Image: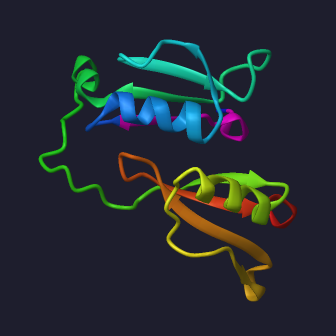
């Protein structure tokens, strides 16, 4: 198992196009496979890089034996995707100016030795923007 090479894939349950636009236009990822219509899109940080993130239409998970669709649209926060930042203030301000709603301003947590803030994508998935020097 290569846990140090974990990639993230978000299961889209509400609006695939809105998620595609968010990751492409707001976060700045480059779609390298797939498009706004889904059901799957791989994203990279640039056209020359390998994919690092993907979105997948959650309805298609039914193709995998044993998978059961959630009964509710309510999504519990059980996983947080952490995005390292070399300049958290700059990244926070850039995303905020592009319309991303943060839970709060970046906060320093002295006892943990980190500075971070949180936001959600259009599906409600929770992301942490984290000062990379503290990770």
Count how many numbered circles sit on residues in the image.
0
* 129 or 114, nearer to the observer: 129
Above or below — where is 90 with respect to 110? above
Q: Is residue 135 visible?
A: yes
- Where residue 7 appears, as percent x and y from the top left, is 61, 34
- Where residue 68 appears, as percent x and y from the top left, is 18, 35
Quadrant of the snapshot with the C terminus: bottom right
- Where residue 134 appears, as percent x and y from the top left, is 83, 67
Q: How is the image coloured?
A: rainbow
Quarter residue 128 falls in: bottom right
The span picked out in magenta is 2-11
In the image, residue 52 lies in the stretch drawn in magenta: no
Q: Is residue 8 visible?
A: no
Residue lying furthest front: 97
Seen at 66% across and 59% down, the residue is 129
- Where residue 45 appears, as percent x and y from the top left, is 72, 29
Above or below — where is 74 with respect to 33? below
Does residue 92 appear to the left or right of 59 in the view shown? Answer: right
Quadrant of the snapshot with the N terminus: top right
Above or below — where is 31 with respect to 110? above
Above or below — where is 131 with respect to 106? above
Residue lying furthest top: 33
Residue lying furthest bottom: 111
In the image, residue 4 lies in the stretch drawn in magenta: yes
Does residue 92 appear to the left or right of 74 in the view shown? Answer: right
* 8 or 16, nearer to the observer: 16
Seen at 30% across and 34% down, the residue is 15
Quarter residue 76 falls in: bottom left
Seen at 48% across and 12% down, the residue is 34
């Amino acid at each position: 198992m290569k846990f140090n090479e974990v990639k993230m894939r978000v299961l889209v349950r509400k609006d695939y196009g809105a998620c595609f636009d968010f990751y492409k236009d707001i976060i700045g990822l480059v779609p390298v496979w797939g498009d706004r219509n889904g059901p799957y899109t791989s994203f990279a940080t640039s056209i020359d890089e390998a994919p690092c993130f993907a979105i997948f239409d959650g309805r298609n998970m039914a193709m995998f034996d044993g998978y059961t669709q959630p009964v509710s649209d309510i999504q519990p926060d059980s996983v947080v995707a952490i995005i390292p930042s070399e300049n958290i203030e700059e990244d926070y301000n850039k995303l905020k100016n592009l319309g991303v709603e943060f839970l709060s301003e970046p906060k320093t947590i002295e006892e943990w030795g980190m500075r971070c803030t949180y936001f959600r994508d259009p599906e409600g998935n929770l992301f942490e923007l984290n000062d990379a020097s503290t990770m």
